[in-house]
Amino acid sequence: MIHDFEYFAPKTLKEALALLDKYQDDCKVICGGQSLLVLMRQGLVAPPYMIDIKGIAELSYIKDDKDGLKIGATTTHRAIEKSPVVKKKYPVLAKMETRLASIQTRNWGTIGGNVCHGDPAGDPLPVLIALGATLTMTGSKGKRSMPAENFCLDYFETALEPGELLTEIALPVVPPNTGTAYTKFNVIESDLATVGVAVSVTLGAGDSCQDIRIALGASAPTPIRPKKAEAILKGKKITDALLAQAGETASTEADPISDIYASEEYRRELIKVLVPRLTREAMANAKKA
Amino acid sequence: MKKELKLKVNGQPYELYIKPKTLLVQVLRDHIGLTGTKRGCNDSSCGACTIMLNGMAVKSCSILALQANGCEVVTVEGLAKGNKLSPLQNAFLDHGSYQCGFCTPGMLMSSTALLAENPKPTKEEIKEGIDGNICRCTGYNSIIRAVTAVVKGEYKEAK
């Protein structure tokens, strides 16, 4: 049962920020609402004021320039998945989107909404972290940016301050000889991840691992980078033995829960298997790049 | 408290005053009286409430009705032209693409949106197109056969 609320549908960012300033913690921002309405129906979220930013056209865009790709926060999943520039330059992002929920959800749901929901099992954040994305938040006093990996603080808790909106996701230009891969393990296709793993590898001389970023979803209270596992691989010629060691290490860096989908032990096992598998896939993609 | 909502449903303009918490499926079924759209799980899982909003398939249980302000909605009632069923509706009939029928409106809307976007989908693409719709009678194959028949051009003319 959804509780009553007062509803505002600002048409510009400026109007939205003025409303956020006025209602602070008493309001909740809705965009596509594909995650939020589920919580509201269960009565878990019952804000007195709702600010609907879905209609703010200036926040819905995909721009490609010399610095990389900029995605407006209210861009739908479907727009990203179908974008020719995303498919060409960041195929892992388009591929991730096609496995995010159903077409209906992707048609209305937005990437910014998904990120701000702060669900550690969400698909976009691990991929954004692996790609080295920066998130920009805007408040009435100005903008600030942070790496995507710092955005989530805890389960469903983000770095957004009252009065702030996530406005843009920026992806840096993909360095040469770099490949990225993402997969999630789930029982039903289009379900949330039981475990999600994204890996980005930059190959150096002799196909050694010059740089690597690993991001795990549904493996801790927030998406995480298992940096000890990364350190095992970085700068090395990657071998099966090193990959196995990295998978093992990543599974101990994770802090997964047990729930109806999988036990903690099972999730650690998945991480152990998926980190090497996705690293190999990212390396194969890097060789094609 | 109540807010004005203006939208077009199956070409017909409507102007309503609703509580902001009202979901689009409630407006369609309870306020406008178009009960073809089904309220199944009410949880964004089953797809029985799928409609087309500005040409896109969406789940009407998961959208605040006010978000559809100024939009064009097509429900299953809007697929037929007068007494003439749409090609997909005819194909569903011929292929027995329903058992209890509860998922049928959502299946029709998802496949209509799919064909509008991609008139020649492969079998895999058809499966992806109805991925968000659950048929609890598990009659998926007959649904895929019906969509395939339309794709093959077997239902060009409305019967």
Image (tube, helix red, strand yellow):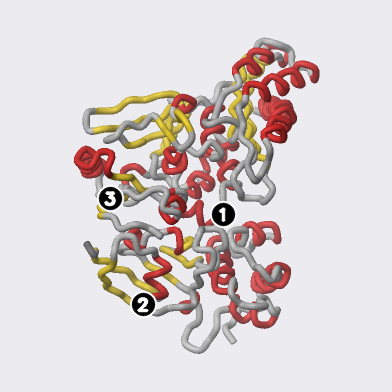
- Element at label 2: loop
Q: Is residue B58 above or below residue B13?
A: above
Ranked by sequence position, the earlier of labels 1 and 3 is 3
Q: Are marks 1 and 2 in contact (CB under 8 Å)?
A: no
**Type of amino acid under label 3:** Pro
Residue at coordinates 30% horizontally, 64% vertically from top-left? B70
Identify the residue shown where x is 22% and y is 62%: B1
Q: Which residue is mark 1?
A: A102
Residue type (three-letter) at the residue carrying disc 1: Ser
Badge 3 is on which residue? A48
How far apart marks 1 and 2 lie (CA) works out to 27 Å
Q: CA distance from mark 2 to mark 3?
A: 27 Å
* Chain identifier of the residue bearing label 2 in the image: B
Label 2 belongs to which residue? Answer: B32
Q: Is residue B35 above or below residue A116?
A: below
Q: Identity of the amino acid at label 2?
A: Ile
